[in-house]
Amino acid sequence: MNESNTDVIQGTLDMLILKTLSLEPLHGFGIARRVEQISRDVFKVNPGSLLTALQRLERAGWLDAEWRQTQNSRRAKFYRLTRAGKKQLEAETADWTRRSAAIARLLRQEG
Amino acid sequence: MSFWRQLTFGLRRLIRRNVADSDATDEVEQYYDEAVAVWKTRGLSDLDARRAARLELGNATVVRERVRTYGWENAVRTFGSDLRYAVRRLGSHPGFTIVSVLTLALGIGASTAIFSAVNPIFFEPLPYPHAGRIMMVWNVYRSARTELSFGTYQELAHRSRSFASMTTVEPWQPALTGGAQAERIEGQAVSASFFTVLGVAPALGRDFQPSEDMFNGPKVVIISDRLWQRHFRGDSAILGQTVKLDGDNFTIIGVMPRNFEDVLSPTADVWTPAQYDTRAVVKDLSSWVWGNHLHVAGRLRPGVTCAQAFQELDQIAHTPWPDFPRPRWGSLREGIILDSLQDDIAHTVRSALLAVLGAVFLVLAIACVNVTNLVLARSQQRRGEFSLRAALGASRTRILRQVVTESLLLALLGGLSGIGVAAAGVRALIALSPSGLPRLDAIAVNGPAFAFAFGLSAVVGLLTGIFPALHLSRSEMHTSLQQTSRRTAGSHSLTRRALVITEVALALVLLIGTGLLLHSARRLLAVSPGFDPSRLLTLQVQTSGHQFDDLPSAPTAGSDARRRFYRNALDTVREVPGVEEAAFTSALPLSDDPSWVTLYGAHFEGDAPQTGHNVIRYAVSADYCRTMQIPIRSGRCIDEHDTATVQHVALLSESLARSRFPGQDPIGKRLHVGPDDQPWFVVVGVAGDVRQTSLALDAPEAVYLSTEQTWFADDTLSFVVRARGDAAALAPAIKNAIWSVDKDQPIVRVATMDQLIATTEAERNFVLILFEAFGLVALVLAAIGIYGVLAGSVVERTREIGVRAALGASRRSILALILRDGMRLTAFGILLGLGAAAGATRFLVTLLYGISPLDWMTWVSVTVLLAAVAALACWTPAWRAACVDPSITLRAE
């Protein structure tokens, strides 16, 4: 828990979840850990935001969920990317790349 | 797809709420357990691992709430719990709930009922295509509408270009024979274009053709679906069958659709072409075709406005053409009245209905004010509860939502019971309705009225909900929690006081209206009709059958038979035991005899050729004046010596004598009544004025003639019988006496004169009854309002009153203090109400008789009544205040 821990950038949580799940099905905590690990603890995931986001994505049809046993035999709700979710991820990734590239260009010019 | 998932997910969670809730809890718990497990693998003890997880992740309860309250179904759930809470609250305060719901039900129900009655008359378009184009055309006499003659109709139909089609309409009441029993049915004799004007074609068969509306044309009828079902059992081979009406065979050529409504004659079951003799219009100005007895309707061409049509007709009226000669009574000197059919049928009842509509909206306003007041008083008592909820974290919107839900529920309950009240009200209205009320069949608690009730209850609900809720958010909620004692609430009770003042003012307006109507009704019943109505039985005796037809070979045979029948019938009636005196007349005062039957033109010797008087023609038997006890002012009455063969005589009414011969003796003057080519009638006497149509209308000018001497034998006469005892009890014996002369002659409208008088005043009575009912409701509601506010303020001021008592205030002075408070509100309300009533009662002018809308007696007595009721309502809270025990109150602090 150092100073560099920040909340996930506004509006990117959905994309991060989708990306994380595109590798393998995970439960809520698993997703949070994965995001934190891959971002090298740059992003801290708020459980309230994460769990409501999962509900939202499930309802949108981008995720499916089922209750399964974890490795340490605890019942957990696992989320899996659906076909529609895969499409959405591609769209969001493309959109993000376009926007971040634009921002990077602007910042370079400024600098 | 996504919407579908949203819906199914939400529904699943709504239905299996426990599963959904435990799932959410499990998921959050599992999340934390995993986090704890991670900390433990880093070497923390169980307790420390838990603390670390909590520090990192935040409060699990908050997270669980966030997850659980996600989704649309949560709003539904909140509403559900609000609703359950509202139901519980209303249930735990039955007094408040019952009074509010009843108040709303009365207000909403009464206004819905009245609206249901008024809607088809004023607002709903008549059930015809482009109904707005259908116009009624009237003759004008002394600036009032009167009927037209066929001659005038023909001229207008020929010369005007504004109408696509025009038709005449007149009542026709044939006797239907051939069934088990002869019956008299309602019908209309019309032009061939009648149904074209209305724009409705027969459902079966065909419409009339112009060739069927010719003098001596084929006898055909179109019948109503009602008659088809009732008399012919819906026989599918009905077309071409014949039906016997007044002794003639008529061929049925059409059946009207089941939903066809003839607003001109709602009970009409048969229609036949009138078959006027068009040649007689020019040939014979004294013939029947020039009698002013027709209603004329027309359908405007598309694009022609009512104003354009009126201009054209008015121009025609004032520029006679030589091809269209006009007699004196068809001269159209005063022009023409043109009115849409819808306005025309509402014309006679408009002022009464508008007054009732106004009254019922006052009641509704009072009801709403009252409920608002009750809700406000309650939210005042609930301030502690709201503060507590706010302190526990409820947001302002959440509390507002709760309050609005409660008010809406209350309004909805009120609306639902209101519909019950409306259904009962509509039934009562139909039962009470005066005979002149049009479109009675169309009155029902129907769609629009239903929507009206629900819309009203919703608006009322929002208003009553938002009012106190706004109040609540304006006051700082948390401060009230700090208040341990009930203090006097400043702005809050100010609003409620203003509401009570409004209520009293509204009630006073309504009560003054009621008082005026009541007073005028009393005046009206004290009016003398010009004869003695007590113990008077009246019967209308008609003659029907071919034995009364005048034949070319014997031109007066039928008329003689008619006169003989009536003479003999009168003689037998006089023999009936219990009959003091008996007579007959062609026009019965205070009956609903239409004016076109009774009204004739009178022309005195020496009058200018185009002037004349419209007079009621009373063709009477000898002794009519004595039987009715109409006073003879000078000269003599018509007696048995006035037979056909001697000098024809006439009796003038006082008003006619005065207007035509001011300051002179009319006896010996000569006049014509009806056609000019008959022998002169010589005036032999003057009779007192008799009210013909209503007690409220001045007696019309009238002429009395002998039935033996008039130029035609009336086919319908009214018998009047003065009984020794109970008049109604004599009816069967008298009917049998008349039938002993000829059993086939119909006797209709058997009624005592007292009943007839009640009927003629039915419209006023109708308005009066409704105003009385509404006035009573308003009075009770105002009293409840005053009581509620005062009772509330006494509760709030208990401590102050206790202090006063402890400091030595007597019971009397505390009583006076509260009474003064209540009466001050009443006084303000009364002042306001008096001002409003001065404006509002002007709309009652046409319904009042003999008193001004500013009649001071009524105003004073109504004000005193309201003040007395208000004082009564103040008494209980005041007494309760006076009984406050200072030691208990002060110790309670």
Image (tube, coloured by chain):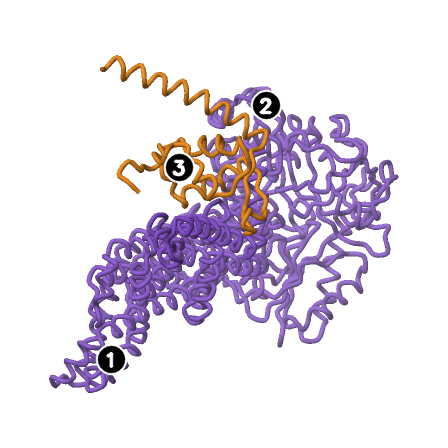
Q: Which residue is mark 1?
A: B881
Q: Circles 2 and 1: CB distance less than 8 Å?
A: no
Q: Residues within 10 Å of mark 1 (few under 14, many from 20)?
A: many
Image point (14%, 80%), residue name: B804
Q: Amino acid at mark 1?
A: Ala
Q: CA distance from mark 3 to mark 1?
A: 71 Å
Disc number at residue A50? none
Q: As rendered, which of B333 and B138 lies closer to the eye?
A: B138
The picture's colour for chain B is purple
Mark 2 vs mark 1: in front: 1
Q: Which residue is mark 3?
A: A36
Point out residue B365 in the picture as x, y percentages from the top left corner: 38, 55
Q: Amino acid at mark 2?
A: Phe
Q: To which chain does the residue with label 3 belong?
A: A
Q: As rendered, which of B395 and A105 lies closer to the eye?
A: A105
Marked residue nearer the N-terminal end (2 or 1): 2
Q: To which chain does the residue with label 1 belong?
A: B
Q: As rendered, which of B613 and B883 lies closer to the eye?
A: B883
Disc number at residue B324? 2
Q: Residues within 10 Å of mark 2 (few under 14, many from 20)?
A: some
Image point (39%, 68%), residue name: B780
Is residue B260 shown left or right of residue B144?
right
Point out residue B625 in the picture as x, y percentages from the top left corner: 56, 62
Q: Name the image quarter holding the N terminus of chain A.
A: top left
